[in-house]
Amino acid sequence: MAFRKLGLEPTLVETILACGYKVPTPVQAQVIPVVLRRADLIAIAPTGTGKTAAFTLPLLQNLALQPRTSPASSETKLSNRIPRRIPRALVLTPTRELAIQVFQSVQTYGQKLEVEVVNLFGGVSYDAQIEKLQAGVDIVVATPGRLRDLLERGAVDLSKLQVLVLDEADRMLDMGFIEDVEVIINQTAKNRQTLLFSATFSDEVRGLAKKFLNKPESVHASPQEKTAPQVSHVIHPVDPPQKMPLLVHLIEQHPKRQILVFTRTKIKADEVAKSLTARGFLCMATHSGRTQSYRTKAMACFKDGRISVLVATDVAARGLDIEDLSLVINFEIPNLPEDYVHRIGRTGRAGQSGKAVSLVTQDELYLLNPIEQLIKTSIPQVWVEGFAPLNFNPKDTQGRNKNSRTKEFKKTAPKPKTRNEKKRPWE
């Protein structure tokens, strides 16, 4: 199916084709017509399936289509003389990285339309963001914490909002943004169109949809697949002291590839990056403890190939969109199976092949079963020659006892946010 058959205007079709897209992805083919009809929507799709374009393209068209004479006129066109006003569309994302990615997509796809967009997230000055809002914008792309702060300062008015997009809603709820999200939604117009995108459909996401969406249509881009089918998975059992040497070995086996390495904590990300740098690899670490300028620099260096290895935590990795990234390595298995889905979603994007490698110790083995249940795949275990573990029983999936697992989860899982916090480092 061609983009023009989905109901998009020629101006947008020309832009998307110029960006190198030839045919819509399955999620785009299903979502675009629904959004153009201005219906509410719940879209469940794996990350990396093209969902940003799926909502951005029709959103831009709906905002840019203006009557020539009066609202009752049926003759419309894509106008380049839309008067500046308070925001008509809002895209909420869980992290700065994803907000930046969506913002750039809106700018790219809307380059031939006179549509103003502003990006709002923490870690930078309020003044520049407030100045842009006062100048007048059509679309706001924001993280929940910073947008709520600006609402409380009276710097933004959402009363005329026409479209609300909740991007990666499951992650926003996992990160404790539910209070901020509800406060923001309650300040928007009641007759808005609401679009909810999520990689999973948990009870929390289902509750959010029931509360704020009006008779939504549903799209399941890949109902049987939690991960992109073109991504292969493999587990390398290893003893803890051999994890770092094995990681080095794997990177050396792929000297011409860009590799994204995941850890559970900020401390471990810095340790791994420091160790790799000491061994001569071009490497940086990105996580919520880094400044926004550093995180932006790390992303830019990784995208343009100035570094070959990027070590990241789950929070900082949201929104990473690297062209032709073919290898993701889980240095540590995530506590939540949904995080595994999001991690490996950084590879195998837009139909490209990819590989997800996980380094697993005996104490982490218990984390695999929930992951395999979620992705409906049994992940093969491959022992690497020279790194075979001395203490590894693949049948012993209990790992540590229940109490130690509970303590570890409490220690590493992100805490819900409160309004008394002065900083939101994960935004």
Image (cartoon, rainbow, N blue to C red):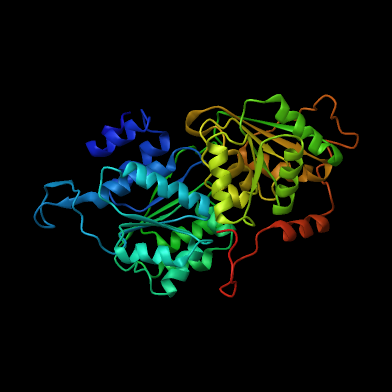
Taking 276 as reference, is 399 left or right?
Answer: right
Q: Is residue 387 above or below residue 67?
A: above
Q: How many marks?
A: 0
Tell me if residue 332 can be seen.
no
Q: Position of residue 338 (x, y in %)?
A: 61, 47
Q: Position of residue 366 (x, y in %)?
A: 77, 45
Foreground residue among 214 and 278: 278
Residue drawn at 34 percent across, 67 percent down? 158
Q: Quadrant of the N terminus?
A: top left
Taking 242 as reference, is 149 left or right?
Answer: left
Q: Position of residue 34 (x, y in %)?
A: 32, 45
Residue drawn at 74 percent across, 60 percent down? 411
Residue drawn at 54 percent across, 63 percent down? 177
Q: Is residue 159 above or below residue 172?
A: below
Residue 390: which quarter of the image?
top right
Q: Is residue 202 above or below residue 29?
A: below
Taking 30 as reference, is 258 left or right?
Answer: right
Q: Is residue 379 above or below residue 115?
A: above
Residue 10: which quarter of the image?
top left
Taking 398 as reference, is 130 left or right?
Answer: left
Tell me if residue 179 can be seen.
yes
Q: Residue furthest right?
A: 390
Q: Quadrant of the C terminus?
A: bottom right
